[in-house]
Image (cartoon, helix red, strand yellow):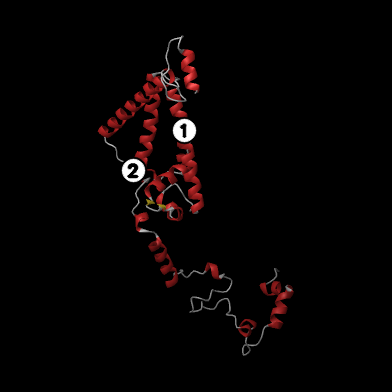
Amino acid sequence: MPDSPESDADDRPHDDRDARESPPDDQPTDAAADGTAPDDADQSSDPSVPDEGESAGTSPQPSVPDDGAESSDSAAHQAVPDDVQKYDRFKKIEGGTYDRANEFLRDRTYITAREWAIARLCADFRTETGVEMTKIGENLPELVPFMTDTYTPQAVNQARAAFEEKVRKAGATFLYGAMCDFFTAEELDDVMYEATEVAKFLLEVEGVELSVEEELEAEDRISEVMRDVREHSAALRHDECPHCGGELDGGEGDSGGSTAEADD
């Protein structure tokens, strides 16, 4: 004959212990004595008290922000200056990343995306007393979409100085290449065309709208300037002394005298 459920229960010693330790009906249980609600009790009407076995961080009650949190968010939005909120540069690459912008610039220029953005902002936020570096640094993520961190005024100034130094060195390098007769006139036009296209593209990304007529006029003016540079550099190399600017005679007989005058 198979054992009955009662006999199985009798074989378990803890059931006997439970039976012996069960309090009478008229006595409070341990949970009640401790002030803890039993497991099958209804959830407390106070939503701030979590259910037993449930951490306060996982309470099913929805979290409602207090008035302090709402006021702080509103104050943070109001803290953004009006000119920062209205700034509309770099909107064409709002979904772009810093790495993509930096890669593009590295392939075509000597500047980084950080230096490009800071240079543009320093030009736009310049006042009579100087550049507003604190405003630029504190609001950098709002001003430039691919910049995610704020900058100190010192970091803004460092990027601005790095941009200026690179432009000066690149300008000297380019001008020497144009003046030393390394490039032919046609090659120099090609160099200027490529440089102009990159510069115009960066301006358009920043939000500058250029018409076709404006682009053609800019290209013509740049070409004219470069032709003048090449012509004057040729005259400088062959007809004028680089030290004093005096005219040099091409005759062999006068070469010594001309050199002596130049040395004087």
Q: Quadrant of residue 213?
A: top left
User: From the image, which quarter does the N terminus lie in?
Assistant: bottom right
Residue indicated by mark 1: 170
Picture mark count? 2
Up/down of 180 relative to 99, above or below = above
Q: Is residue 223 above or below residue 114?
A: above
**Mark 2 or mark 1, whichever is nearer to me:** 1
The residue positioned farthest toward the bottom in the image shown? 26
How busy is the neighbourhood of tag 2: few (under 14 within 10 Å), some, or many (20 plus)?
A: some
Q: Position of residue 123 (x, y in %)?
A: 39, 46
- Seen from the viewer's position, the closer of residues 238 and 101 is 238
Question: Which of the marked residues, 2 or 1, is nearer the chain's N terminus?
Answer: 1
Q: Mark 2 belongs to which amino acid? A: Gly
The residue that appears at 54% across and 78% down in the rendered structure is 41
Crowd class of label 1 (few under 14; some 14 to 19; many from 20; radius 10 Å): some
- Using the numbered discs, state the Cα–Cα distance from disc 2 to disc 1 in whole angstroms: 25 Å
* Numbered tag placed on residue 107 in the rendering: none
Query: What secondary structure is found at the residue carrying circle 1?
Result: helix
Query: Where is mark 2, residue-wise?
Result: 207
Picture coordinates of residue 100, whole percent (x, y): 46, 40
Comparing 45 with 139, the one in front is: 139
Judging depth in this view, the residue of 25 and 130 nearest the camera is 130
Find numbered disc 2 in the image and state the secondary structure of the residue it sits on.
Answer: loop
Residue 133 location (% of width, % of height) = 45, 52
Residue 15 placement: quadrant: bottom right
Callout 1 amino acid: Ala
Residue 66 in view here: no
Give the answer, above or below, for where 43 lies relative to 224. Answer: below
Residue 251 visible here: yes
